[in-house]
Structure formats: C-alpha cells, structure tokens
Image (cartoon, coloured by chain):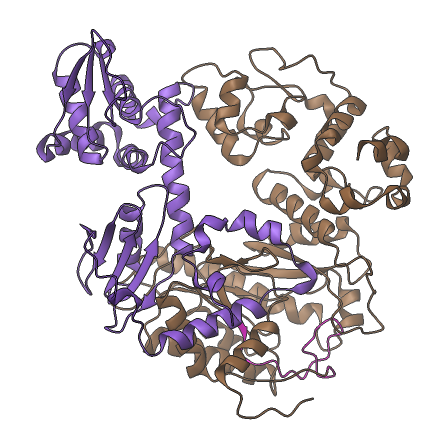
Amino acid sequence: MYTFICENSIDGIFTGVYDAWASGHGHQNVRLISHPPENYELFQEYIAVAPDSQKSEKVAATLKNRLGEEVHYLICQAILANELTTRKGGPDKADCVYRTIVLGLAMKNGSRVLEALGEPYVHRVFELSRATEAESHHLLGFLRFCELENGVLFAAIHPKNNVLPVLGEHFTDRLPLENFLIYDEIRRLAVVHKAGKNYLIADASSLNQNIITQYSQNEQTFRRLWCAFFESIAIDARKNPRLQQQNIPKRFRRDIVEFNERT
Amino acid sequence: MYITENLSLTEKLKILSDAAKYDVACTSSGIDRSGNGRGMGNTLAPGICHTFSADGRCISLLKILFTNECIFRCAYCQNNCNTDAARASFTPDEICTLTMEFYRRNYIEGLFLSSGILISPNHTMELIYETIRKLREIHHFNGYIHVKAIPGADPLLIEKTGFLADRMSINMELPTAQSLRALAPNKSRAAILKPMRMIQSGITQNRYDVALYRQAPRFVPAGQSTQMIIGATPETDYQVIKVAESLYQNFELKRVFYSAFINVTHNRLLPALPGGPPLLREHRLYQADWLLRYYHFRADELLCEERPDFNVFLDPKCDWALRHLEYFPVEINRADYTTLLRVPGIGAKSARRIVKARRMNRLDFTDLKKIGVVLKRALYFITCSGKMMYHTKLDENYICQNLMRDKTQIPKELQNSGYEQLSLFDAEHLADFGINANACSSLL
C-alpha cells in the first residue's frame, strides 16, 4: 500500500490526485491523506506530495472537460471544507476526492458522479461541499463591513470552513468600485480587493491591528441608525428568541454589529 | 395626531420602520443579476438573509414606509388617519443615503419601500417613483428593490415604477371582498385587482420584448407578491388557500404572504385575540402554500367545505397522507417524482436526490437518511425494495398516534397548553383520526 500525504489545499490535493494516478500502483493500492498521520503504519509506504501548480492545473482541466464545470466547482468546495467540524470520523477528504474522480472518469456520463449518493465517498464529498456552501451562503448575509479612516471597507470573520474564495467572488461582483478587505481571523488569510480590479487572497498574518480599529467619521452614525432599525423592526407580540437563534447561530454574532452594539 | 417637525434621521427611521414592520414580505429572491462593474450591487435568485430580528423573522431589505401619514382609515392598520401615532416622512435623498450606506456595509440586500397615502394615491406613487429613480439613476444602485404599488394610482406611474423595481406588490389585505368593505372602507377588491392584472400583463409583454431585444429594459423581473391578514375576519383556512390558489393560477403571483393578525388599533370591529396572534394558523397556511407551489397539490385536496380548517396537530401533508392511505406505501426505487413529493418526510430536494441517486444503485433506508429524508415521518409510508423499515401497520389510527408521539412536531403552543384547551378542540375533528381528547392529552 502507498499513502500519499498531500497539503490541505486545492493545489495540494489535486497534485496528490495526479501523483497517485500516475504512480501506476492501481487504485486499490493507493490512499491519499490531507493531514500527516498520527501513527505511521508498518508495511505502508508514505510519499509526501509537494503542491505543484502545473499538475494541479492538469487535474482541474480534466475535471472541467470530462466531468463538467459544476462537478469541478463542487469538488473544490469540498476541499475548502474543514473536515474536523463536519461530522467527525469520516474517511479522509483527499481520499474521497480521489475515489470520486476515479468513479466519475469511469462513468459514461461523468457529470452525474455527485448524484451517486449511495457511494460513501461520493456522499462524503457531497457533505463537505454542502458544509462550505451553507456557511458561505450564511456569511454572504452575516458579514459586516465597517468603513475605516482611509475609506477602506473592512470585515473580520471566523468561519469553520475556508469560505474566502466564495466571498471574494461575490463581493467583487457586488462592490466593484470599493476597496475592501475580508479578514479570516482563524486562517489568517484575507481577500484584498482594489477598486476596479479583481480580488486576491493574501496571507494576512502581519495585518496592522491598529488600522482596523480606526473607523471613519460617519461609521458610528450609520451603525447607530442600523441598530435602531434592527430594534424597531421586531414585533413584540411575536418575540421568539429560539427561532432567532436557530436562524442566526450564536457563533456568527461576535462579528455582527447589531448583536454587539447597545443603543 | 402629533405635530412633528425637524425630526432627526434616527427618529424618522425608528418611526417609519416601526410603521412598516407588519408588512411581511421581506424576501430578496427571484432574480439573478450580476454586477455591472460601474454602480454598486447585484442580486441572487435564492435571496440572502442579512440578519434575524428578535421575533425570528428574516431581515433582508431595509423595510420602511416613505411616510406614515395616511388619508385612509383601514381598521386594522396602525397608520390609519384616526390613530394617535407619531407621524414622519422621509425625503427621497434620505432614503437614498440610508440604502446606499447600509448596502455598502452589507447590512441589507436592498430596499423595501411602502407608504401611507399622502394627499392622494397619485401623489404618493409619484414620491415612491422619484425615490427609486434617484436610487437607480443618480446613485447607480443595482441591488434589490421591492416597492408597493398604491391601489388607485395612475397606471402610467405604476408602469414607470415597474421598470425600475425588481418586485412589486399590492396587498390583498383580506381574503374576501366583504371583509375588505367592512374593515377598509377606502379600498375595494376591484381597485386592488386592477393594478395586479396590469402588472401581470406588463410582465407577460416584457417577456416577449426581452426575447426580441436582449437589451430591452426588464419590467418587475422578480414578479409580484401580495399579503393577506389572517384572523382579523371570520374567513376559514379553506377560503384563504382558495384565494391564494387562484392568485397563483390567474395572476401568476410569485408569493402570497400570510400575516397573523395583531390587534394594534383596538378598534371595535376587530377581534380581541387574548391568546396572542394566531401564529400556528399562519404556520399551517404557509405549509399549505408550499404544498400548492412546489408539491403539485390543489387546494381542494387539502381542505373542503365540510373540513374548512387545518388540523392543528399535524402538518397539512401528513394530514392529507393519513386520509389517503390508499396511495401508500410508495416504493422508493420505483415511484415517480410527483408521487415521492407526496410522501410526508420527503421534500422537494430529497425527492430530486432520490430520483437521481437510484439510477446508480438501489437505495435502502440508510441511503435515504443520508439523502436527507426525515425517516421518522416517512417510514410509515415507504418501502425500499419491497420492505418497510419496521413492522408498522398501514393504519390511520396507528400512524397518527406514532406521529404525534414525536414531540418536536407538536407546536409549542399546544405543548404548553393543558387539557382544558385541548378539550375545547373540536371533538369531531379528533374523531376523524380515531383519537379521543383524553388519549391525546396523555400523549402531550
């Protein structure tokens, strides 16, 4: 048995898929993992895979051509998911992606591979993909920008999954003429967008913590207005904190202005 | 009436959002429009909820009235000209600033603009038109806009507004013309349906225009919706969903909203409702509404003249299934999509997934669980490869008792209520299910 240890990223796992396939050991004799194992097993050969953008692009191109854009998108989304928070104990994400791709390429109509929910690894990919999708859809609404002194819009988030690519795409389309920064404090990554340009995802471990607390003059005014609206729009006769909590879970609230500001 | 002058923007926003809060339509769905790279904003067909207020309802749009001054005197409305409420009006520029600045900070998905009738319907519609024209043309706002069409306004004005808005709505207010006459003397059924028909034909016409010229301006692209107040007048559930069904069929509405009546004006024409607003009834109507729109049910299948109200204990779909056991059990690996849709515990999404997944391999109960079927409800009605999940009887009485054992299905209001309220519950109704009131209360 051969185990390929890949980096936990789209490039990393796709490179792993390429190497595992190209190794020629046979699908049943290879295994992919996206985290270094806790215990190395005897009679197992471990191969570390360094992410290689060329190999990764080849895999991505094959997926798009043979399985379709949608399957490629959903698989990427699954890779961005955090498997530790999505139903623990399932098979490793990288291996599931590999086996799903193998199945898809063997099928007559590969674009239907993710419909085979009876297969456990396809189901896992589907589940992980849905976790990212659900959280990023939540954050499309729950994310809050504040205007900094220099006019830049800044938002901090603490997501379970790596949702930055989805958010970057959405807000670049929505606010093309704004400079904005979306900071994932857990992964220390940020979406950086300059007015009129496309966004990029950058390492933000050296982000200046001072700048992001200096708000512009008007910021406080609009926060107060928003909080006032938030209070007065609720109907007292229908008060239902359980429903509210179900709809907007508490873990999101630390980053949402109307739950932290008291007017 | 209070004389109010020189209110601050915060005070105005408080008054005019408070006045708009009983309008339920706060969805931002129905249209996909990507950003144009110049202005600000895009829209997503599924809509986005930005936050949820203390009552648990979604806040998606900045829901405000242009003004809460009103010349009408609808008995149920807190803004009618006889109530003693603080009055305020925005200016178009104030609304534009609020919308743009809130939208930039991702507080909202767009604007929901309604209004009291100031001076005349035409004058009010003119103000609304002017506001959203500024928003679209001067501020280049490309997000979602939902506006009310004011009944009785000039059709030309409504048409002009429709080319700028994404969704328009005209409230039915009450399900029958008779109730409308009694509670809203300034409104009439005809005056409400006329602009609704006009918008419908506008949308149909626009579909041809867009097919001919791709660049043709879009008219109310996210469709129109309406709203009915539930519990202010004696209409039955059957009447309400019949009206909703005919609105969907004849007026091609996207949504009909139901709003549980809350007595804010304490008018003598209105019921007192000591137990609070009829939230459970509203909930059942929404469930039935989904059955009409996505599950191929007809209103006559769910209710009839003899049984005009929904069962409070079971949702409309379970209720229907129990009365039509002749259709069950359904074989998961063979039944067609529309049959699957009618099984309690299988929703539109899981039905779609089942139809696709069973192409590859036979499905069993563990697969169904993974797919998202609610087995605790579905297991009485389905077989996988000819086998039921447990040894359950296909018997109305038996299934009903088991379904009711699931505490989460029984609404909170009923869980908390004691035996007394249950015994008030129509004994005949319970007899339909072969349960007597005593057995029922012991289950709860």
Q: Nearer the viewer, residue B396 or B128?
A: B396
Q: Nearer the viewer, residue A120 or B76?
A: A120
Q: Which residues are magenta?
A: B63-83
Q: Is residue A86 above or below residue B182?
A: above
Q: Is residue B33 left or right of residue B118?
A: left
Magenta highlight on residue A79: no
For residue A31, which quarter of the picture? top left
Q: Is residue A125 above or below residue A149?
A: above
Per the picture, the main secondary structure of the magenta-coloured stretch is: loop
- Provide residue A243's location: percent of width, then percent of height: 60, 50
Colour given to chain A in the rendered image: purple
Residue at the extreme top of the image, as rendered: A43
Q: Nearer the viewer, residue B341 or B409?
A: B409
Q: Is residue A103 visible?
A: yes
Q: Is residue B173 left or right of residue B150?
A: right
Colour given to chain B in the rendered image: brown
For residue A104, which quarter of the picture? top left
Q: Residue at x 61, y 68 (%)?
A: B194
- Provide residue B334's location: percent of width, then percent of height: 54, 18
Q: Residue at x 47, y 70 (%)?
A: A226
